Image (cartoon, rainbow, N blue to C red):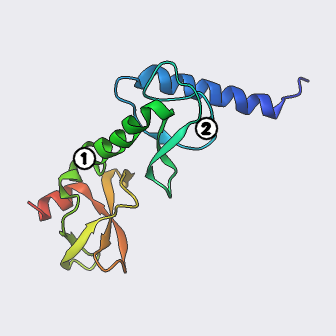
Amino acid sequence: MEQINIKNYYKEYVDTRDALVKAYSIEKPEPFRLVMVKCKDFCQFCVHPKGDVYHHEISDEHKFGFLSCNPCLSNGELAVVDWFETKAYGNANYLRNKEIKVQRSSGTIESDWQLNKSNPFVELINGFDCVNVIKTDKTIKKWANVEELIELNK
């Protein structure tokens, strides 16, 4: 039986993942999990990166974002801004930075909520696109159905 060298396995995994990230994202990179990343000579924004690799995080909690080399540092920062302006929260993105109405599980509609900046993703929950919302006083968080949010906040 062949023995697996775990160090080589992880290196091959990272090399393969990085090659896929590079192959599909030079034009307009997509964020990905910032775990098991190379610390030198990798960049999502150029073809021939050299030197240290910099993280541009969308979510620190989820370790999600972009990687760049030093010459592409501003491209990484702009990619984070662009992602928040265009893709975060999916169809509910236009509610970003606004106080919004949310229906509680009791049926009560409250108007002192906002999209949760620390969790800017769309999750599929029970077959529905949902985003994480938080009360403006930061006391309660919950997942809200995107279609319901759009209907409540026309």
- Residue shown at 59% from the left, 30% from the top: 51
Q: Assign a secondary structure to mark 2.
A: loop
Q: Residue at x 40, y 34 (%)?
A: 30
**Label 2 to label 1: alpha-carbon separation:** 26 Å
Q: How many marks?
A: 2
Within-10-Å neighbours for mark 2: few <14, some 14–19, many 20+: some
Q: Secondary structure at mark 1?
A: helix
Q: Which residue is mark 1?
A: 85
The disc placed on residue 37 is: 2
Q: Position of residue 59 (x, y in %)?
A: 44, 54
User: On the picture, is 33 further left or further right than 144?
Assistant: right
Q: Nearer the viewer, residue 124 or 71?
A: 71
Indicate whether 70 appears above or below 33: above
Q: Position of residue 77 (x, y in %)?
A: 38, 43
Q: Residue 72 lies in what quarter of the image?
A: top left
The amino acid type, in three-letter code, at marker 2 is Val
In this view, which residue lies farthest toward the right?
Answer: 1
Instruction: Say which label, 2 or 1, has the lower sequence index.
Output: 2
